[in-house]
Image (tube, grey):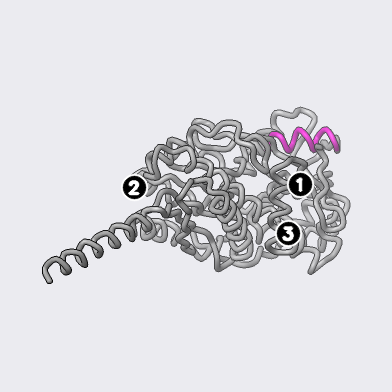
C-alpha cells in the first residue's frame, strides 16, 4: 500500500514537473495600444499586424520550442492613462518586452517607467524627435521626424520646385510640434524657399474633431502658398485636409508626414477629391518593392482577404523586429532582449534593411507617395 502511494506521489511530481516545463515554453510580450477613443481605428490596424507577425514567428518555430503569448492593454487614446496601463502590465510580471505605445505624447509618458523597470519597449509609431534618448529601454521602429522630414523635403522640393510654403500644426501634440519644428528648420536652410503663412491650433488627443479653421485658411489662401506642410495625428490630418478643400485651397499641394491610407479612406468617404494629389512622407506603402513586403502582403491577404494599410504594416514590422531580437537574445529576460534589440543591424524587413541607432531610433530609407484615386503611388522609386 505504501509502495503504491509512493508511486502515485512520484507520478504526480513528474506530471507537475512536466506542467511546469510546458508553462516555461511561453514568452510573454505586452502590447499597449490605443484600442478605443480617437486612435481606435489605427490601433486596431496595428493589432492585426502584430498578430500576423507573431503567428508567423510561432508557426515558423523561430524561437524553437517556445511560443510568444501576447498580453494586451488599452490606453483609450489618452496619454494620461498610458503610464498607469504600462505600470500595471509590468507589475503583473513575466514580460520579456512590450510593443507600444501609439503616439509620441503617450510614449513620452512612459520613458521614466521603462528606465526604472528596465523593460524594453518598441513603439511602432512614435516619431517625435529626441524621445529615443530619454530611455535606454525605448526603441522606435517608425522613422522619427528627424529622418522623415529632411528626406521628404529633399524629394518633394526636387519634384515640385516650390518656393512658397505654408504650415499647419496641432500645438497640443508632441509629434505634431516636433514635425513642424523640423519643417521650419529644414526650410530655413533652403534659401530659395520661404514660409508665407502658418496656422497653429490646439486639439487634445482625446478630442475627436479639428476646430473650425475657416478664417485662418482664408488668410493662408491669400498668402498664395504652393504647398502646405500639415503636422498632426490622424484626426488632424483628416480634418485639416477636408477644411483645406472646403476653403478652396485646391491648387495647393498638402505635404503630410505619415498621412495613412486609412486617413485617405476617411477623407474620400466624406469628400472624394479632398485628398487627391496630397503627398505623404512615410515609412512604407503597399507599393514598396521588396521580398519581405511581398510576403507580408500575401500573408495578410490570405488571413484577411484584402491589402493591409500602413498602420497594419507598422504593427507587423515592430513585432517582426522584436521576434528577431528574441531569437538572438541570450535568454528571454528583459535585459537580454534589450541587448539583442540594441544590436539589430541590417535586418531584412518590409522597410528594407533595418537598424537601430545608439538612441534606439530606426534607420532605413523614407518613402514619398502621392494620393492618386485613393491610393498611394510612390514618387521616389
Q: Main secondary structure of the magenta part?
A: helix
User: In the figure, is residue 40 to the left or right of 85?
Assistant: right
Disc 2 from disc 1: Cα separation: 39 Å
How crowded pointer 2 is (Cα within 10 Å; few <14, some 14-19, many 20+) is rated as few
Residue 238 shown left or right of residue 15 in the figure = right
Q: Say what secondary structure mark 2 lies in.
A: helix
Going from N to C along the chain, the mark reached first, 2 or 3, is 2
Residue 152: within the magenta?
Answer: yes
As for residue 61 lying within the magenta part, the answer is no
Q: Quadrant of the N terminus?
A: bottom left
For this view, does 214 lie left or right of residue 343? right
Provide the secondary structure element on which disc 3 rests.
helix
Please name the residue that numbered disc 2 is placed on. Answer: 117
Q: Which residue does the image show at 46% across and 36% down from the upper left?
A: 340
Question: Do we see residue 135 in this rendering?
Answer: no
Residue 359 in the image: x percent, y percent?
49, 34
The x and y percentages for residue 260 are 71, 54
Quarter of the picture containing the C terminus is top right
Q: Which numbered disc covers residue 114?
A: none
Q: Visible in this render: residue 333?
A: yes
For the residue pair 179 and 247, the one nearer the viewer reads as 179
Q: CA distance from mark 3 to mark 1?
A: 30 Å
Is 278 or 26 nearer to us in this picture? 26
Q: Are marks 2 and 3 in contact (CB under 8 Å)?
A: no
Compared with 377, 343 (above or below) is above
On residue 255, the disc is 1
Task: Report, in whole angstroms, how far the alpha carbon at label 2 lies from the one at label 3.
Answer: 38 Å
Boundaries of the magenta span: 149-159
Amino acid at each position: 500500500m505504501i509502495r503504491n502511494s509512493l508511486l502515485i506521489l512520484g507520478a504526480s511530481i513528474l506530471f507537475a514537473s512536466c506542467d511546469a516545463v510546458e508553462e516555461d515554453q511561453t514568452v510573454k510580450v505586452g502590447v499597449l495600444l490605443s484600442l478605443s477613443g480617437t486612435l481606435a481605428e489605427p490601433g486596431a490596424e496595428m493589432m492585426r499586424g502584430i498578430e500576423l507577425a507573431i503567428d508567423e514567428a510561432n508557426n515558423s518555430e523561430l524561437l524553437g520550442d517556445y511560443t510568444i503569448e501576447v498580453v494586451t492593454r488599452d490606453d483609450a487614446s489618452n496619454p494620461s492613462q498610458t503610464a498607469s496601463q504600462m505600470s500595471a502590465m509590468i507589475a503583473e510580471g513575466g514580460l520579456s518586452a512590450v510593443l507600444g505605445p501609439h503616439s509620441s505624447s503617450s510614449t513620452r509618458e512612459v520613458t521614466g517607467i521603462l528606465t526604472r523597470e528596465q523593460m524594453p519597449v518598441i513603439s511602432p509609431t512614435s516619431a517625435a524627435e529626441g524621445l529615443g534618448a530619454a530611455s535606454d529601454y525605448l526603441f522606435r521602429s517608425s522613422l522619427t521626424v528627424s529622418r522623415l522630414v529632411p528626406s521628404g523635403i529633399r524629394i518633394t522640393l526636387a519634384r515640385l520646385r516650390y518656393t512658397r510654403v505654408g504650415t499647419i500644426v496641432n500645438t497640443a501634440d508632441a509629434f505634431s510640434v516636433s514635425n513642424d519644428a523640423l519643417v521650419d528648420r529644414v526650410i530655413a536652410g533652403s534659401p530659395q524657399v520661404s514660409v508665407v503663412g502658418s496656422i497653429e491650433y490646439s486639439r487634445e488627443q482625446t478630442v475627436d474633431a479639428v476646430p473650425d479653421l475657416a478664417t485662418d485658411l482664408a488668410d493662408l489662401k491669400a498668402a498664395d502658398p504652393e504647398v502646405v506642410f500639415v503636422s498632426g495625428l490622424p484626426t488632424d490630418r483628416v480634418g485639416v485636409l477636408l477644411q483645406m478643400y472646403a476653403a478652396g485651397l485646391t491648387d495647393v499641394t498638402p505635404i503630410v508626414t505619415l498621412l495613412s491610407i486609412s486617413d485617405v479612406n476617411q477623407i474620400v468617404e466624406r469628400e472624394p477629391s479632398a485628398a487627391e494629389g496630397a503627398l505623404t512622407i512615410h515609412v512604407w506603402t503597399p507599393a514598396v518593392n521588396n521580398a519581405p513586403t511581398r510576403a507580408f502582403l500575401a500573408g495578410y491577404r490570405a488571413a484577411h482577404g484584402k491589402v493591409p494599410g500602413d498602420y497594419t504594416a507598422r504593427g507587423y514590422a515592430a513585432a517582426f523586429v522584436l521576434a528577431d531580437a528574441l531569437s538572438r537574445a541570450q535568454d528571454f529576460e528583459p535585459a537580454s532582449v534589450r541587448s539583442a534589440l540594441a544590436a539589430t543591424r541590417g535586418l531584412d524587413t518590409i522597410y528594407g534593411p533595418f537598424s537601430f541607432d545608439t538612441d534606439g531610433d530606426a534607420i532605413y530609407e523614407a518613402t514619398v507617395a502621392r494620393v492618386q484615386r485613393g491610393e498611394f503611388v510612390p514618387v521616389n522609386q
